Image (cartoon, rainbow, N blue to C red):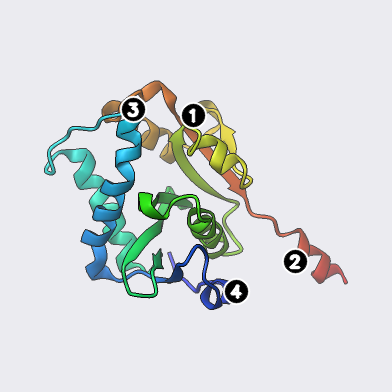
Amino acid sequence: MKRLRLPPSLCRISVGGALFRVGKSQEIETLLDIDRDAGTLFEQAGLHLDLPEDHEFPVSERNRWLRSLDAGSTIMAMEPQGQAVGFAAVGLLNGQPYLEQLSVRRTHMRRGIGSALLHAAIDVSDDGIAGALWLTTYDHLAWNRPFYGAHGFVRVWDGDCDSGIQRELEFQRRWLPMPGQRIAMRRRFDRSAEARTAIS
């Protein structure tokens, strides 16, 4: 995946007290710390993931986030004082843009930071070739499927997913709590404005 170029509008504004920039390779521990903090919300909902750090699931997750950082395809939300409060990591899954993770520290939730990170991920994932941005999430949690649905993502049934997404769902369902609630979603890239411009 090409290195990110954040939308100019996002670079110039503060959302929920946060500023935005591209993540750096040495910030993998920061991503893990943000996600651990955000993960306590899942624990309150009864979803506990007690896997050792050397288990294949957290190892795979860490490696994919690190690849996203190395590729320059991670968006960071930063407090003006310099603390990282959220991130969106974008990768490729079977050649299609895939939202690896979106996490915001609990102290900074419900400020619009997650929405800003998501829309930045959508913008920078559209290379003019791929058809959609994909993600996997929980179906039953208010801050998962309904959140993404409000931003234009729709559920894709397993049989309609390509082999890469199907394998990812199988992997997640093998290790994550409440595996039957894991689903795939996608948001197709809207190039109608480009088409109208090309015609006119």
Residue plotted at (34% across, 75% down): 81
- How far separated are the C-alphas under marks 3 and 4? 38 Å
**Residue 57 place in picture, x, y as percent:** 23, 39
Mark 3 or mark 1: whose residue is earlier in sequence? 1
| Residue at image mark 1 | 139
Q: Earlier in the sequence, mark 1 or mark 4?
A: 4
Q: Are marks 4 and 2 in contact (CB under 8 Å)?
A: no
- Looking at marks 2 and 3 on the same chain, the residue that comes earlier in the sequence is marked by 3
Report the residue marked by disc 4. 9
For marks 3 and 1, give the one nearer the viewer.
1
Q: Nearer the viewer, mark 2 or mark 3?
A: 3
**Residue flagged by tag 3: what amino acid is it?**
Arg
Density class for disc 1 (Cα within 10 Å; few <14, some 14-19, many ≥20) is some
Instruction: Identify the residue at the far right of this view.
Output: 200
Towards the viewer: 159 or 55: 55
User: Do we see residue 86 in this rendering?
Assistant: yes
Q: Earlier in the sequence, mark 1 or mark 2?
A: 1
Up-down: is 26 above or below 121? below
Dot 4: element: helix
Image check: 179 left or right of 66?
A: right
How many residues crowd mark 3 within 10 Å: few (<14), some (14–19), many (20+)?
some
Q: Element type at marker 3?
A: helix
Front label number (1 vs 2): 1
Name which residue type carries label 4. Ser
Task: Residue under label 3, please give it.
Answer: 173
